[in-house]
Image (tube, rainbow, N blue to C red):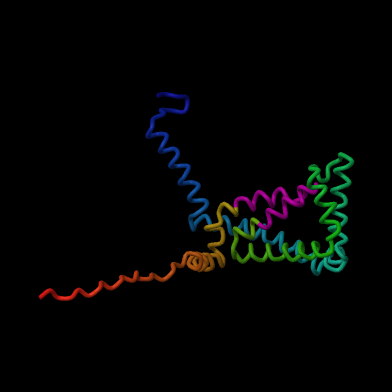
Amino acid sequence: MESSRGTVTASGTLEAASGNVRLADWFYRSKVASLLWLVARLWLGYGWLNAGYQKLWGSESAAFWNGGGAAVKGFAAAGVAGSKAGTGGASYGWFAAFLHGFVIPNASWIAKLVALSELAIGALLILGLFTGAAAFAGLALNLVYMFTGSAGVNPAYAIVAVFLILAWRNAGYLGLDRFALPKARDLFHRRSPMVKPVVPARPAVAPVH
């Protein structure tokens, strides 16, 4: 049949779909596209690495690593207050309750966990080691920050992280994943040694005279 986009046939539809699949396959599997993901990895990894560094040894260390979690407590308290005032903050009541009941009382160790997590995420992304998992962990932190009511760089980080998760097969090819992923695949798919079935011996039959 004819349409404004051209002739639509069964074979034409299949060809179009095949073209879309080939494009997605190129982005998320090809070694050439891994150069694109290298740029995304380095940009996102540096952002996380720097954020973790500042919380451990830099300008934010007094509020995170050495401050008893003051920054986390203030961040969570602002999210709860904004939610109650209807001016933003944690827009969902269940998340405001989570901040009030869990995050604020445990702010000290959560602050240290956040600092170490950000540093580790950044290092793994830059090295290209378990890129998909590192991007997923970064996305989880972005969502926590955004649920609390903070935007900043989090939406941009989250978008890049989603693409890196989708491209986990080749996002770290120009990195340590080139060697680590095959090793991990072999480790988890290693087959058990074959055990030969034991055939019971047949009873001896006495000769007939």
Residue at 79 percent across and 43 percent down: it is: 92
Residue at 59 percent across and 63 percent down: it is: 130
- The image shows residue 80, relative to residue 12, as above or below, that is below
Q: Is residue 56 left or right of residue 10?
A: right
The answer to whether residue 150 shows anywhere in this view is no
Q: Position of residue 172 (x, y in %)?
A: 56, 61
Task: Give residue 197's quadrant in the image.
Answer: bottom left
Q: Is residue 131 left or right of residue 78?
A: left
- The image shows residue 59, relative to residue 8, as above or below, that is below
Image: magenta residue range: 137-163
- The image shows residue 98, relative to residue 197, as above or below, that is above
Residue at 79 percent across and 47 percent down: it is: 95
**Magenta highlight on residue 108:** no
Quarter of the image for the C terminus: give it. Answer: bottom left
Task: Give residue 10's quadrant in the image.
Answer: top left
Q: Position of residue 33 (x, y in %)?
A: 52, 55
